[in-house]
């Protein structure tokens, strides 16, 4: 597969040649181990836990191709990818700089678990590069941000993050789940490691849990060895489903980009809505940055109703097409209140500090008809203004 091929072509073909016995669809290699003549290093053995079966290696090649990274790996979940990457990069005694508005699982790991591994962190404002140097320590090893933050849709000064990391000898890590490789490819912008919850857009069908790390081959190799030991391996059937889902990634995300922008504009103009967080709206604080860096604004948004939590609950009961469920990035539209799901483990004080109100609604736009979704939202909002 040529590096000159477009992303749509890579999503279909990368990692799948030569084809096994001519099979157009890569088979599921449902075997835990493989015959060997002995010799070689332990990690040279083919074994599911070592993440090197044919299903794994095909996925690794496809993921690396999609973001133009040097290498990639898959893991049993997004959190397995995040935690293994951070533990590998930081090592005992290491210090991390991270933006504060993060996915709830990542926030919990940093604030409640990282210290047990002999590691520390400080939060930074990802939009104010001038303030970052003051947070540096002799032990600082890395900086961690999200391309589009969960659930407030903030867009850090991504160019400054990558440049700051290079200038201070730090490893730059970015959670690219919300943007996807279709809209943003971190290795192209100087990031060392790009992390995904493959449960979301990469798979796109809400039927597996998985994670991925893409980027520099030296770091991918170290993270893979740690993952082998920690045991966060993806099983062959999940690998098969992820590979199948990724073939339509570009088509799905293009549709979600288009529909989400239309719906964000509709919500922004509705009298019942107090505010919409979507980087494709000119009123978003980072709109110009997102327009310059992204190939699309994504399928995720969040918004506040003027009536607060009770209005949000009433609205979510009235919608008929979006499913009220956690997670995101699937073909079906999903809605949730982060205060009750993804960020429910945070204290009310922590949620308020980072801007997550009890009435905030997060909306993952699916691939349904944009007309039908717009009509459904309008009906659900009627009478709430």
Image (spheres, helix red, strand yellow):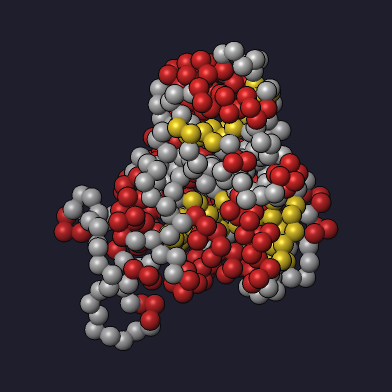
| Residue shown at 66% from the left, 36% from the top | 358
Nearer the observer, 354 or 53: 354
Query: Would you place residue 141 above or below residue 107 in this image?
Result: below
Q: Is residue 26 left or right of residue 189?
A: left
Nearer the observer, 103 or 309: 309
**Occupied quadrant, residue 366:** top left
Where residue 348 sits: x, y (%)?
Answer: 71, 45
Q: Is residue 114 left or right of residue 76?
A: right
**Occupied quadrant, residue 194:** bottom right
Give the residue furthest to the left. Answer: 21
| Residue shown at 44% from the left, 17% from the top | 371
The quarter of the rendered structure image containing the C terminus is top right
Can residue 253 be seen in the rendering of this structure? yes
Where residue 92 sits: x, y (%)?
Answer: 66, 75
Where residue 141 sits: x, y (%)?
Answer: 68, 67
Where residue 338 sits: x, y (%)?
Answer: 60, 40
| Residue shown at 66% from the left, 71% from the top | 116
**Occupied quadrant, residue 46:** bottom left
Q: Is residue 320 left or right of residue 123?
A: left
């Amino acid at each position: 597969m040529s590096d000159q091929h477009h992303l749509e072509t890579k999503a279909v073909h990368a990692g799948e040649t030569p084809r096994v016995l001519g099979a157009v669809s890569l088979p599921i290699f449902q075997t835990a181990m493989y015959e060997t003549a002995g010799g070689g290093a332990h990690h040279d053995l083919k074994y599911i836990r070592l993440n090197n079966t044919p299903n794994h290696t095909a996925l690794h090649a496809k993921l690396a191709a999609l973001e133009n990274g040097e290498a990639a790996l898959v893991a049993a979940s997004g959190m397995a990818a995040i935690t293994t990457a951070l533990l590998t990069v930081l090592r005992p005694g290491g210090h991390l700089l991270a933006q504060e508005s993060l996915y709830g699982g990542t926030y919990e790991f940093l604030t409640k678990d990282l210290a047990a591994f002999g590691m520390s962190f400080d939060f930074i404002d990802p939009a104010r590069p001038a303030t970052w140097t003051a947070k540096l320590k002799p032990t600082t090893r890395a900086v961690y941000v999200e391309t589009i933050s969960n659930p407030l849709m903030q867009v850090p000064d991504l160019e400054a993050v990558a440049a700051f990391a290079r200038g201070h000898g730090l490893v730059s890590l970015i959670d690219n789940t919300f943007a996807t490789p279709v809209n943003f490819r971190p290795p192209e912008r100087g990031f060392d490691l790009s992390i995904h919850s493959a449960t979301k857009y990469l798979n796109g069908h809400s039927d597996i849990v998985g994670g991925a790390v893409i980027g520099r081959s030296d770091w991918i190799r170290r993270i893979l060895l740690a993952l082998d030991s920690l045991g966060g391996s993806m099983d062959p059937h999940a690998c098969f489903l992820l590979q199948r889902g990724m073939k339509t990634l570009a088509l799905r995300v293009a549709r979600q980009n288009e529909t989400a922008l239309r719906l964000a504009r509709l919500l922004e103009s509705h009298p019942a809505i107090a505010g919409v967080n979507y980087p494709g709206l000119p009123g978003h604080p980072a709109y110009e940055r997102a327009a310059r860096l992204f190939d699309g604004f994504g399928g995720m948004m969040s918004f506040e109703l003027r009536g607060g939590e009770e209005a949000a609950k009433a609205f979510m009961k009235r919608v008929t097409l979006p499913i009220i469920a956690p997670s995101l990035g699937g073909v079906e539209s999903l809605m949730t209140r982060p205060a009750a799901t993804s960020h429910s483990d945070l204290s009310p004080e922590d949620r308020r500090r980072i801007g997550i109100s009890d009435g905030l609604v997060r909306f993952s736009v699916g691939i349904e008809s944009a007309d039908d979704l717009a009509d459904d939202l309008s009906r659900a909002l009627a009478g709430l203004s």
